Amino acid sequence: MKKKMILAVLALGIFASSCSSDDDNTSSVNSNLTLNLDGLEALGDDFVYEGWIIVDGSPVSTGTFSSVDFPQTFNVNSEQLAMATTFVLSIEPAVDSDPAPAATKILAGDFSGTLASVNSNGIVADFSTSTGNYILATPTDVDDTNEESGVWFLDNSSGSAVAGLDLPTLTDGWKYEGWAVIDGTPVSTGTFTDPTLADDNAATSVFKGDAGNGPDFPGEDYLQNAPAGMTFPTDLRGATIVISVEPVPDNSPTPFTLKPLAHVVPEEASVRTTISMEVGPVSVISGTVTKS
């Protein structure tokens, strides 16, 4: 069944040029498609969710929506809905001149009769075995009195620094992002796709010190140019460290709903010492899609 779903999802890209919408259907007879999804968050003004059914290997739009209150019901061509084998949900620009599905697909599942159980595992990634470690340190300056003001996703427990994050490879349309939630405000550590390498803002961060980019792993020093209402250097003890999964392009400057790893830094945490993360608040989005 999983192989069938994956092949159908691939068809969203391979057969994108043949996608259609309800307006293109030759029959005016419609049936209901009801979505009952758990874990989605509002995307703001610039993006919407769009549903797709796979019919004869090609994607057919079932309509867009922005509300995340469910259930929601859509009218879909009856013949096409009866033939649909898979449902997929994507994130699309609110003003979208491309009729094909975007790369950012968030849910998928095969129909068994009239019901499809959908989730983000596979279509985004399966985070069930994800683990994470980090240290508090500020390696981008020469001051050793503010080490609690930086977070780096590495493990130095063996005496040598190695990658601190064990995360699955994301599908196209997604990136990881690290965060420190300081007094309730999330501040990014940067985005990345490979947890064994430096993140995307390693050389451009405005928060780091002036002594270099730091270790070749994701992380950040909060030393200067603090956002409004904050003061850097800071003390990350008591803050929450988060790894989120973000759509590309990103819909918001705050963390997206998928957060597979998180951890509250202990008040007594030692600097330059490996600290283990825990399972995050949302590691899978799921729900049901019903034909009627």
Image (tube, helix red, strand yellow):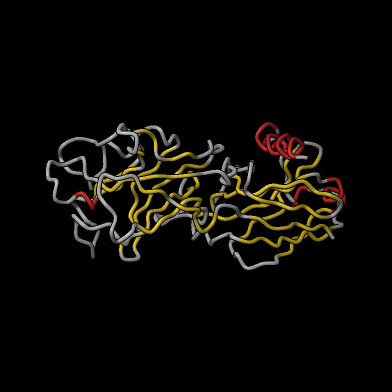
Residue drawn at 79 percent across, 58 percent down: 290
Q: Nearer the viewer, residue 28 or 199?
A: 199
In the displayed structure, 245 sits above or below 192; it is below
Using residue 236 as the reference point, say whether residue 209 is left or right of it.
Answer: left
Residue drawn at 21 percent across, 45 percent down: 138
Residue 205 position, x and y percent, is 26, 43
- Where does the N terminus fall, quadrant-wise? top right
Q: Nearer the viewer, residue 105 or 210?
A: 210
In the displayed structure, 175 sits above or below 262; it is above
In the displayed structure, 211 sits above or below 241; it is above
Residue drawn at 56 percent across, 43 percent down: 129
Residue 268 position, x and y percent, is 28, 59
Which of the 4 image quadrants contains residue 264?
A: bottom left
Residue drawn at 44 percent across, 45 percent down: 132
- Where does the C terminus fall, quadrant-wise? bottom right
Q: Residue furthest front?
A: 158
Using residue 184 as the reference point, say whether residue 83 is left or right of it.
Answer: right
Residue 41 position, x and y percent, is 54, 61
Using residue 239 as the reference point, say whether residue 279 is left or right of it.
Answer: right
Residue 127 position, x and y percent, is 56, 45
Using residue 158 as the reference point, say whether residue 19 is left or right of it.
Answer: right
Please count the marks in the image: 0
Which of the 4 image quadrants contains residue 210?
A: top left
